């Protein structure tokens, strides 16, 4: 690393919700900055006024904060280089357009959309790749032929002039090694739209320079933009930052992860019950690996161990099973209090009819703790196991209820349940010991425990019986045992 201070930026366009790819880009920028003691800038790229929405920008910021990706400068965090919404920086761009026009790197172009469409159609008919050919490219900005038309308020864009199509632009990508981009990949591109609004490639270069950005990490789909930006850096005489292009993310079918995927956006992940710690851990591993192969990592661990040489250039496959598993690990890393606080904030939680007695939630947590991988799953389990209106005797229980001793076991169980609000551990143990000996011929193992579990939760499989027996109010235990008994032969 050079002595230049590390300054990275995450620069979302507020045209949609925050997606997995965007979160990973933000995260890698954040981890890189924090690992090197640098700063992260957050900049909103909203000069496409038709597609940008302030509300979406604020939602994206909320998502980042929820995930624990905090920025050092940006919206709501004043810094030396603000404002951080590009739409509030329009006067910063103007001087550089003028500079490019004056120095012959850009020109006014009066081509209309129809003329451009006609050029495209012609190229297509001839089977040629399309590239814009502007009859205005060789006119200076102050040529009277141009100034007269401007004075008449004719609509013009300002285009960058790609001077040498045969030139190859080369740079050392921090993720992918040497990259060579031939200039002819791009035609003369727009800097200012005809309504005077500057476009992404131009604003991005002006701002990365103005904000003293040292490293730019973004998705590989931006490589052709990087070519345009390299041309701009050179023409404006700006120092070029280091670039690192992150691989694309593929879905389970090895197709580009679509925005329609059920877990594509931050709000999807939240709704599915993933916790920030799980999401961050999983996305960090989606294209990067820990030097000792460790998998369960907190943000602090990640900051400590993240280096760009371990970022993988090949496509990353989004594996929701793995995220699920990692999320479960982070849920189990929380204290019961933390988990309960998260669950009780969820809108579904308030719809549950749960036991209300003091200390009950600790007993319930002991039951769901080892079983749930997401908060949504925890809510489901609370609903199925503790909300009597959702008690349901599921299919595999029917066979258990038909076993020869089941009826006797459940009768014994029901008759020994006391009138206390809850069973104590000792009371439960005593009942079970009693059943073992009183049922004719003796009963043990699964032939004892499966019937009891069915009588508690309507399923032969699930958490430890003694945890359930202590967490379910005796009133529910009685109702459920009676309902099961009715189905026994
Ligand atoms: N606003 C661009 C985007 O959201 C940013 C690309 C970049 O990081 O330069 O894709």
Image: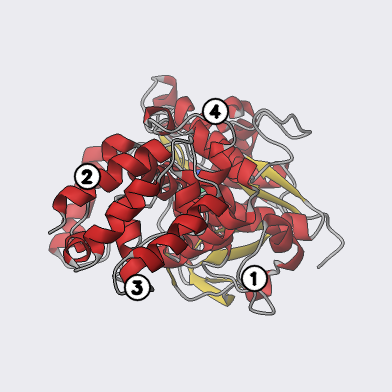
Q: Looking at the image, which residue is at 34% across and 47% down?
A: 415
Between discs 3 and 2, the one toward the N terminus: 3
Kindly identify which residue carries mark 1.
174
Is 292 or 412 nearer to us in this picture?
412
Q: Looking at the image, which residue is at 46% across and 26% down?
A: 55
Judged left or right of residue 133, residue 120 is left
Is 431 or 45 nearer to us in this picture?
431
| Badge 1 element | loop
Residue 8 place in picture, x, y as percent: 69, 51
Kindly identify which residue carries mark 3.
442
| Badge 3 element | loop
Q: Which mark is residue 483?
A: 2
Q: Is mark 2 within 8 Å of ligand 1?
A: no
> Do the residues under discs 4 and 2 have CB atoms within 8 angstroms?
no
Kindly identify which residue carries mark 4.
87
The Cα–Cα distance between marks 4 and 1, rounded to whole angstroms, is 30 Å
Is 330 or 96 nearer to us in this picture?
330
Report crowding for label 2: few under 14, some 14 to 19, many 20 or more residues within 10 A (C-alpha).
Answer: some
The Cα–Cα distance between marks 3 and 1, rounded to whole angstroms, is 70 Å
Q: Quadrant of the C terminus?
A: bottom left
Judged left or right of residue 129, residue 150 is right
Judged left or right of residue 41, residue 410 is left
Q: Nearer the viewer, mark 4 or mark 1?
A: 1
Q: Looking at the image, which residue is at 41% across and 43% down?
A: 382
Q: Is residue 161 visible?
A: no
Is 184 or 83 nearer to us in this picture?
83
Residue 130 place in picture, x, y as percent: 28, 60
């Amino acid at each position: 690393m050079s002595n230049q201070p590390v300054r990275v930026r995450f620069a979302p366009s507020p045209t949609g919700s925050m997606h997995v790819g965007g979160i990973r880009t933000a995260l890698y920028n954040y981890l890189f900055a924090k690992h090197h003691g640098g700063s992260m800038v957050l900049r909103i790229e909203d000069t496409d006024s038709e597609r940008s929405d302030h509300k979406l920008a604020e939602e994206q910021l909320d998502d980042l904060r929820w995930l624990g990706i905090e920025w050092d400068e940006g919206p709501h965090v004043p810094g030396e280089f603000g404002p951080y919404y590009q739409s509030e920086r329009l006067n910063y761009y103007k001087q550089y357009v003028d500079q490019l026009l004056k120095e012959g790197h850009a020109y006014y172009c009066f081509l209309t959309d129809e003329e451009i469409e006609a050029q495209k159609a012609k190229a297509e008919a001839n089977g040629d790749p399309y590239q814009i050919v502007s009859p205005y490219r060789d006119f200076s900005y102050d040529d009277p032929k141009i100034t007269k038309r401007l004075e008449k308020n004719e609509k013009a864009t300002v285009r960058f002039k790609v001077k040498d199509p045969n030139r190859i632009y080369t740079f050392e990508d921090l993720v992918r090694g040497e990259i060579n981009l031939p200039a002819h990949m791009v035609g003369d591109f727009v800097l200012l739209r005809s309504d005077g609004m500057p476009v992404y490639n131009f604003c991005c270069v002006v701002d990365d320079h103005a904000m003293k950005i040292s490293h730019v990490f973004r998705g590989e789909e931006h490589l052709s933009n990087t070519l345009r930006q390299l041309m701009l850096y050179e023409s404006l005489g700006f120092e070029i930052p280091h670039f690192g292009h992150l691989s694309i993310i593929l879905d389970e079918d090895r197709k580009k992860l679509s925005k329609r995927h059920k877990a594509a956006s931050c709000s999807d992940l939240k709704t599915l019950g993933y916790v920030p710690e799980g999401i961050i851990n999983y996305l960090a591993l989606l294209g990067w690996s820990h030097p000792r192969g460790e998998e369960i990592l907190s943000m602090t661990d990640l900051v400590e161990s993240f280096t760009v040489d371990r970022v993988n250039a090949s496509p990353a496959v989004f594996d929701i099973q793995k995220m699920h598993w990692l999320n479960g690990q982070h849920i189990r890393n929380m204290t019961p209090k933390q988990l309960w606080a998260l669950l009780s904030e969820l809108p579904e939680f308030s719809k549950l009819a749960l036991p209300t007695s003091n200390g009950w939630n600790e007993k319930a947590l002991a039951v769901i703790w080892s079983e749930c991988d997401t908060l949504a799953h925890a809510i489901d389990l609370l609903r199925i196991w503790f909300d009597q209106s959702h008690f349901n005797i599921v299919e595999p229980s029917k066979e258990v209820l038909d076993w020869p001793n089941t009826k006797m076991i459940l009768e014994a169980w029901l008759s020994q349940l006391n009138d206390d609000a809850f069973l104590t551990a000792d009371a439960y143990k005593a009942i079970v010991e009693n059943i073992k000996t009183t049922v004719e011929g003796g009963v043990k193992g699964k032939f004892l425990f499966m019937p009891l579990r069915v009588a508690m939760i309507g399923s032969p499989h699930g958490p430890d019986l003694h945890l359930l027996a202590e967490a379910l109010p005796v009133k529910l235990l009685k109702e459920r045992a009676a309902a099961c008994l009715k189905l026994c032969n």
